[in-house]
Image (cartoon, rainbow, N blue to C red):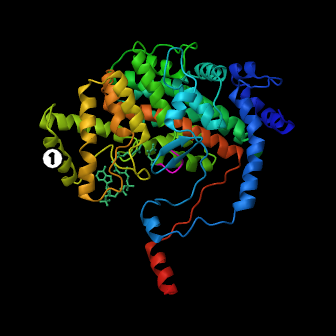
């Protein structure tokens, strides 16, 4: 480890001590660190130099003109953010640190007997750009298990929520309340130097991810009357524990589904509503709990993460209106009636993608393997053959193909989780991985406060009239 990396790690050491597990594993002589924090401390000085070099070489180069339509059009295509964990190609879909979903499925370590990647491995990849060893992944599983307990007052907040309060609102409340014990907020009050921001941000991010299964499990059990939460099992991986807290760990299929689900929902570059919100709020040096609480509020919108709930509601309504084994013609008419009612077809279309989402494909492949005869899965397949043509004929949507949300609910329902209001909570557990990884890098690289320029319509009109 370089002297610079060691000094960075030493600067972060007070917060590192907060986790007995992390400090026990800390080794200054190891050539291949098993601790993620140690590996990160090695990478940060190099990346600071890399960013300096990229800015020196390209800092004054333009991407092209900004059109007034982009200001009115939700900033589509506007190059505006740095996001290192993943990049989205309109045709090909997402790559996590350069790796496609099938590549991640092939390369990332798996649970004994499992075939889907462990989300712990994906987090290591997002943060470091490296495929971790099974030992590094096992260490992360144990670290998260050791950090998983919730403060009692957060449990009480959840227990006091009326079951009629949407699970996403409860989720956001609980995550925001974790700010009470934020290492970053405390360090800032104590006068931490800018150069050391990443250390407590790392600790908060690890705590955030580690505590999400207990939050999600508590919400699920409270809202749907499923009894008391079991304890975390430190010998098991993150997804097994989440499944156990939800009451589904008996089903190996469900546990594998969660591993796949958390992996593929984790990150979708920086411009989507939840990721961008997390980054924006974090740029004010709000701690990771406040930043991610805000991100969850964006994820809870029906055009974004809530679409997975909306898809299931739409499918169920379709079944009750036209029957379970409806003809293609009846399904087509139902899709048209949705459009004619001024509603969107949930699970279809995308702000960036222009082809079928590879996350949809990964879930379809999972279904073909584990639930080929499921009726709802068959309906999802039938809809795939109908909706794109209808959307193309309607002539508005730029992308008629399905996104990730068109498929996820059907898989969860198959294993008995048919409470669709809960689905976006699982999306929120996963998206924390991508947002947290970027928050850590933003603080390590000294990312500034976000503050783009806005214009009024009067100002735009005047600007161009004056130029005419
Ligand atoms: C994890 C995720 O966030 S993935 C997205 C989840 N959301 C959904 O599945 C909801 C359904 N889809 C949509 O509403 C949209 O496709 C979005 C929000 C995802 C993307 O929106 P945009 O980038 O604005 O899409 P696009 O440029 O194609 O929109 C052009 C028009 O087509 C419409 N359109 C786009 N997709 C659909 C759809 N699935 N059903 C009906 N109309 C649609 C838009 O509402 C818009 O109509 P308008 O001109 O009357 O405002
Ligand atoms: O990229 C987007 O805008 C929406 C999306 O699919 C995601 O955030 O997963």
Say whether residue 359 is magenta.
no
Left or right, 168 with respect to 392, comes to right
Q: How crowded is mark 1: few (under 14 residues within 10 Å), some or many (20 or more)?
A: few
State the residue in front, 68 or 55. Answer: 55
Please tell me which residue is depicted at 44% across the width and 73% down the height of the picture: 457
Q: In this view, does 361 lie to the left or right of 144?
A: left
Query: For numbered disc 1, what is the local secondary structure?
Result: helix
Can residue 246 be seen here? The reply is: no
Q: Which quadrant would the N terminus be assigned to in this image?
A: top right
Above or below, comparing residue 74 to residue 344 in the picture:
below
| Viewer-side residue, 292 vs 85 | 85
Asked where in the image residue 14 lies, by quadrant, the reply is: top right
Q: What type of secondary structure mainly makes up the magenta span?
A: loop
Above or below 187: residue 456? below
Say whether residue 270 is magenta: yes
Residue sitting at x 45%, y 50%: 91
The x, y position of residue 415, in whole percent, is 33, 21
Task: Tell me which segment is drawn in magenta.
Answer: 268-272
Q: Estimate the x, y position of residue 304 in percent, counting from the top left.
A: 40, 45
User: Residue at the spot x=59%, y=28% of the render?
Assistant: 121
In the drawing, does residue 329 fall left or right of residue 123? left
Mark 1: C-beta under 8 Å from nearest atom of ligand 1: no
Provide residue 221's location: percent of width, then percent of height: 38, 21
Residue 424, quarter of picture: top left
State the residue position of label 1. Answer: 333
- Residue lying furthest right: 3
């Amino acid at each position: 480890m370089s002297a610079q990396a060691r000094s960075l790690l030493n600067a972060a050491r007070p917060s590192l001590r907060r986790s007995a597990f992390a400090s026990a594993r800390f080794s200054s002589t190891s050539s291949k660190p098993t601790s993620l924090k140690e590996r990160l401390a090695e990478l940060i000085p190099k990346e600071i130099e890399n960013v300096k070099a990229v800015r020196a070489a390209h800092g004054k180069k333009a991407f092209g003109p900004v059109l007034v339509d982009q200001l009115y059009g939700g900033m589509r295509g506007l190059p505006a953010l740095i996001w290192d964990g993943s990049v989205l190609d309109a045709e090909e879909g997402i790559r996590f640190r350069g790796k496609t979903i099938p590549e991640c499925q092939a390369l990332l370590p798996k649970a004994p007997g499992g075939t889907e990647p462990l989300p712990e491995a994906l987090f290591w990849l997002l943060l470091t750009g490296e495929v971790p060893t099974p030992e590094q992944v096992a260490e992360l599983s144990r670290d998260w298990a050791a950090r998983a307990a919730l403060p009692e007052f957060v449990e009480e907040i959840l227990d006091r929520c009326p079951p009629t309060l949407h699970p996403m609102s409860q989720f956001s409340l609980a995550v925001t309340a974790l700010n009470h014990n934020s290492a970053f907020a405390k360090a800032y009050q104590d006068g931490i130097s800018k150069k050391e921001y990443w250390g407590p941000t790392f600790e908060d991010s690890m705590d955030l991810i580690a505590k999400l299964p207990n939050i999600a499990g508590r919400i699920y059990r409270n809202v749907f009357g499923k009894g008391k939460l079991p304890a975390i099992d430190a010998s098991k991986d993150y997804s097994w524990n989440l499944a156990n807290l939800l009451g589904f760990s008996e089903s190996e299929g469900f546990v594998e589904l969660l591993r796949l689900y958390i992996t593929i929902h984790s990150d979708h570059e920086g411009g989507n509503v939840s990721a961008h919100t997390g980054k924006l709020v974090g740029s004010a040096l709000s701690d990771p709990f406040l930043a991610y609480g805000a991100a969850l509020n964006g994820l809870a919108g029906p055009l974004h993460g809530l679409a997975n709930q909306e898809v299931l509601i739409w499918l169920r309504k379709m079944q009750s209106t036209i029957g379970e084994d409806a003809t293609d013609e009846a399904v087509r008419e139902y899709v048209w009636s949705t459009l004619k009612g001024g509603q969107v077809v949930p699970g279809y279309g995308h702000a960036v993608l222009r082809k079928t989402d590879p996350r949809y494909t990964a879930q379809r492949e999972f279904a073909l393997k584990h639930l080929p005869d499921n009726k709802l899965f068959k309906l999802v397949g039938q809809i795939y053959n109908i909706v794109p043509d209808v959307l193309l004929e309607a002539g508005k949507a730029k992308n008629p193909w399905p996104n990730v949300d068109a498929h996820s609910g059907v898989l969860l329902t198959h294993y008995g989780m048919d409470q669709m209001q809960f689905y976006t909570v699982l999306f929120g557990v996963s998206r924390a991985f991508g947002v947290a990884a970027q928050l850590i890098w933003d603080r390590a690289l000294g990312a500034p406060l976000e503050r783009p320029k806005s214009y009024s319509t009067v100002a735009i009109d005047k600007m161009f009239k004056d130029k005419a």
